Image: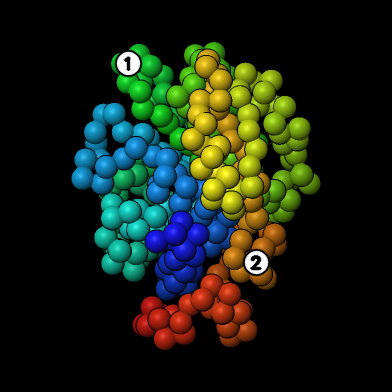
Amino acid sequence: MELEEIAKNIRKKIFLMSCRAGGGHIAPSFSCVEILVALYFKILNIDKNDLHNENRDRFILSKGHASSALYSILAKRGIIEEKLLDTFCQRGGILGAHPESHSIPGVEVSTGSLGHGLSFGAGMALAGKINNKDYRVFVLQSDGECQEGSVWEAAAFAAHHKLNNLVVIVDYNKLQSLGRTNDILSLEPFCDRWKSFGWSVKEVDGHDISRIIENLESLPYTNNKPNVLIAHTVKGKGISFMENIPLWHYRIPNSKEEIEIALKELGIDRKEFEEGRK
Ligand SMILES: Cc1ncc(C[n+]2csc(CCOP(=O)(O)OP(=O)(O)O)c2C)c(N)n1
């Protein structure tokens, strides 16, 4: 299957499981679909039959609220069962609103409290260096998350230790939960900020899978610095009325009109949608 087709399929899954659950974060999940497809289908060195191999690449979804995107990808890669997606945010299930490493195969670190993924990632990357392993550590962060002080402490630590095996991808959709990042607490000049912390920086269209892959295949960007790829994205990408609108950070479509438009734009069969709601 083409990677673009997989991305389309992942958006359908995210929508169906979130509507069934009546919860989750559709718009923040939609903004990182292509990034996850590129990682899980082209870049990450992981074996679904040997998930704890010590040489595996590590991935940390630091923006844990995009869990529905991660779960859909794990299912598509055959790491968790597809059927499990129906239990998203259900009582007694393991697929919660934020991913937990102790219960979900393939989840390296429990996340949800923003601002901590990079500290875990830097520790894992340093351990790789100390133990002479050549695995890489990828951390997907959101932009509002980069307002957290802990992110910059970890960034300084990673540069100090020359962790060129560490890669941050920022899902730079310019929105956080209640408004625009630039209005609430601007990160700009964002690239220069990372550079001044001693990181190698690249930028990419975060919905162009080929370009994302190109950028991740050219790692490490320099020999002795950690790497950051700033991915310019659109929050809610894929449903026209959600795109770039802060209101949709938490909301799940529920009016007849919203659902009609979303099903049409995502290419979801109404019968399949109704089945999922039973
Ligand atoms: C430490 C912490 N504070 C607050 C929250 C609640 N929260 C969940 S998502 C979110 C905002 C997300 O905005 P951003 O980081 O830009 O992510 P995006 O939704 O754009 O991917 C907040 C404040 C949290 N999960 N963790």
- Mark 2 residue type: Met
Front residue of 170 and 183:
170
Q: Is residue 102 visible in this depiction of the protein? A: no
Mark 1 = which residue?
132
Front residue of 150 and 15:
15
Which labelled disc corresponds to residue 242?
2
Relative image position of residue 122 (x, y in whole percent): 46, 25
When the figure is inspected, residue 220 is found, relative to residue 253, above or below; the finding is: above
Quarter of the view holding residue 231? top right
When the figure is inspected, residue 274 is found, relative to residue 204, above or below; the finding is: below
Residue positioned most to the right: 183
Circles 2 and 1, Cβ within 8 Å, touching? The answer is no
Quadrant of the frame with the C terminus: bottom left
- Residue in the picture at 61% in, 24% down: 200
Relative image position of residue 206 (x, y in whole percent): 60, 48
Q: What is the number of callouts on the image?
A: 2
Horizontal placement of 138 versus 201: left or right? left
- Residue in the picture at 49% in, 35% down: 217
- Mark 1 residue type: Asn
